[in-house]
Image (cartoon, rainbow, N blue to C red):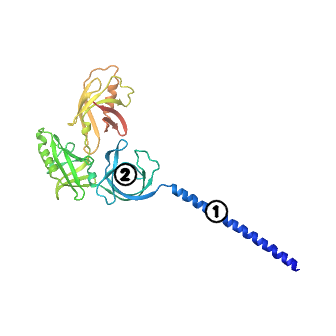
Amino acid sequence: MILKKTQTYLYRLVLLNITTLNNMTKVLKFALFIISIGSLISCATSKQPNLSTKTLIIGSKKVDCTGVGPQKCYQIKEDGAEEWSNFYGTIEGFEYKEGYEYQIEVAMTEVENPPADASSLKYKLVKVLKEKQDPYMTLEGTWVIENLEGKTTDPLKTYIAFDPATGRISGYAGCNGLGGSMKYDAEADTLSAGPFMSTMMYCEEVAEHERTLGKVLEQFNKFKVEGEVLTLFKNDEVLVTAKKGENHRDLFRNWEVTQIEGVADLGGNIPNFFLSKDLEANGTGSCNNFKGKFELDAYSTKIKIGPLAATRMMCPENDVEGAFFMQVDKVDRYEVKDKELYLYSGDQLLIKAKRK
């Protein structure tokens, strides 16, 4: 009986030791697994580039610069800096609109083995902290004047044009062009312009308007843009108000037709025409000469050409001229782009021409 009890005790002791050994083995394996994962994470982390963030202020206009080649660069300031500097790279995820100033937070990572002419840092947008429209950039474009010192003007021929990107300003009142430079002081919210250069023609019918416009350009030092309306001030005195419009000066040229809707090949029958600032049209349909008037809108690119009067020579085997006159009669808007003129009816291109 005692022997049997002793055998049972020894058997249980062996089983306990075996179970303990199994548990220890499991613990040891788990510990080794944790150590392996930690090593992998440590290695992976050590191979990752350093990551940091900073705050940048992005200016409201890009500037010409030269990196690998000529390009446009952001103007940037780090938070607290006084001077702008060029930023030659890109910022992943950042959608930029010219005319707006941004304060953004970016994440920077090191680039392994960057090209010799590239940055060693990669930038990615974290978040936009502030976004505001630059008042100076709201001046961009042509502003049509309908009244100068209580006297009605021709809105197609009386305007001020601003180009904040280049710091240039120009004015026109129907005869002579005026042009000069301008500079905006953001802290004082003032704008200084001039001196102005002008052509010297004398046009009696608009001479008074030109003198008045010249005084406005020389005297104004403040501005306010509200929607489509611009007001120019001398301190608190209103000098003139104007509405956002179109400058048609690129239209007033000689044009040579290169494409007509419905005509597969112009061959040697090339219509050409001249559109003048006096709203007169003249040219040739490729056989007969024509002349007439056209109408423009001061606030859009709408155009109506004609009616046109043409000579009546017979032009056998010339289908181009008839198609040209037919399509010209349908034109209701235009676009000038890259020294080419596009004449449309709605969204349909009817005539395309190049500058002569």
Q: Is residue 311 above or below residue 213?
A: above
Where residue 303 appears, x then y in whole percent? 28, 39
In this rendering, which labeled residue sits more in front, label 2 or label 1? 1
Q: Secondary structure at mark 1?
A: helix
Q: Residue at x 52, y 58 (%)?
A: 45
Q: Which residue is label 1 attached to?
A: 32
Where residue 25 appears, x then y in whole percent? 70, 65
Q: Is residue 235 above or below residue 345?
A: below
Between 122 and 287, the one lying in front of the other is 122
Q: Is residue 290 above or below residue 8?
A: above
Where residue 138 appears, x then y in whole percent? 28, 52
Where residue 85 appears, x then y in whole percent? 31, 52
Quarter of image, res 319: top left
Q: Determine crowd level at label 1: few under 14, some 14-19, many 20+ residues with C-alpha closer than 10 A.
A: few
Quarter of image, res 158: top left
Q: Which residue is label 2 attached to?
A: 96
Number of numbered callouts drawn: 2
